[in-house]
Amino acid sequence: MTLEPSVRLLPFVTVALLTLGFTAGPAAAQRGTPPTFAASVAAVAPAVVTISAVAGPKRPDPDPDAEDEPAQDEGPIGSGVIIDAKGVVLTNAHVARGATSIEVVTGDGRRYRPARVATDARTNLSVLIIGDGAATFPHARLADSDRARVGDWVVAIGAPFGLSTTATAGIISARVRDDTGADAADYIQTSAVLREGSSGGPLVNVDGEVVGINTIYAFEAVGLAFTIPSNTARVVAAQLVDKGRVSRPWLGILTQALTPELARALATGTSAGLLVADVVPASPGAAAGLRPGDLLVAFDTRPLRVRTDLARALAQARAGQTVSLQIRRRDGATRSVTVTLAEERDEVPSSLVALRVHPDDDDTQVGREATHLAAELARRPARSRARLRGA
């Protein structure tokens, strides 16, 4: 599929047209299109916030006689969504990165300075604690993102260009699972339009539940955007609130996809599963009896087909948790083994490839590093690239 740059429209006109243009008529409603997204928006909008920040001092002027510039008030830089009545705001890590002071503005105009900020750079998620233990906040429910289907209707709510509580509708376009390694990110691709300032806002299903946290959009391709699944966000947010950091589970095995050629060479009798290539001594995998040549067929009830299936399952588990692995041995025997996941002992460098986009752009309000999704597009012919950036 070739991605062609879209025609640039005035930003505010684009937002307005796309916000209004998805109200379906009677004929579309008969085909299953919601006649209105008003209920979905109304269920979540009170929990959507605008995040403003004061950035750090600008870089010193090369002229030694020049005076240092004071910190600049950058105004709105992103969005967020309250996910707990106690005042827990979930947003993107790049929204708060580099800011010396953060202000959260609720939909009814109340302003809060977070008492605590915790960030997980690997998933690009942050939590901002704005509650004092006494106040109760309107909050959104997190959906089971594993149930999200390609073709489902969704609404993105946020503050593009500082326009608070802006809603744009679309569908879930794809489930993006890049098979580049154990840390490869998992995204939900959507056609709902995101723009600068949309980062951290929720992607909402027709039931008024948050199915993802918006994070990346294609700069020149309207309707090409990516969101962090709510199941990943739920696990990360809970740990950031409880401990201020994410404790990642470790299995201690190296896997590779089972290609048809490998299946024939190893006479596995099946092409389903992940091939265990190596097992770290004294790891949880070794303690469970896993060995090279085993096929991992399922993690609890999750089928495993590519390595990122295992990465997604681990991302939603916790260190210390006991899980069941269904394996197939070289002799054809299938069995289930239990394994207690350990905590990742050392910080493993992320396998996500960071790509700096717009290197001449001095705008620090948005993240200028995309994930491997941008890198993948960058490898395509120049005429088919769509520039990606943090929303």
Image: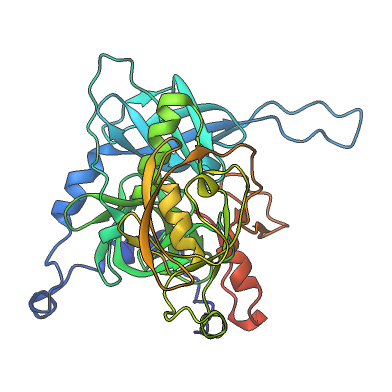
In the image, residue 72 lies at what x, y percent? 62, 31
Q: Nearer the viewer, residue 238 or 79?
A: 238
Q: Is residue 5 above or below residue 288?
A: below
Q: What is the x, y in percent for residue 377? A: 59, 72
Q: Is residue 302 left or right of 344 when viewed as pictured?
A: left
Residue located at (70% from left, 30% from top): 57
Q: Image quadrant of residue 360?
A: bottom right
Nearest the viewer among 50 and 95 is 95
Q: Position of residue 291 (x, y in %)?
A: 55, 58
Q: Residue at x 52, y 49 (%)?
A: 285
The quadrant in which residue 204 appears is bottom left
Q: Is 53 placed above or below 203 here? A: above
Where residue 365 sits: x, y (%)?
57, 44
Frontmost residue, 88 versus 147: 147
Residue at horizontal 49%, vertical 51%? 289
Question: Can I make out residue 321 in this image?
Answer: yes
Q: Residue furthest right?
A: 64
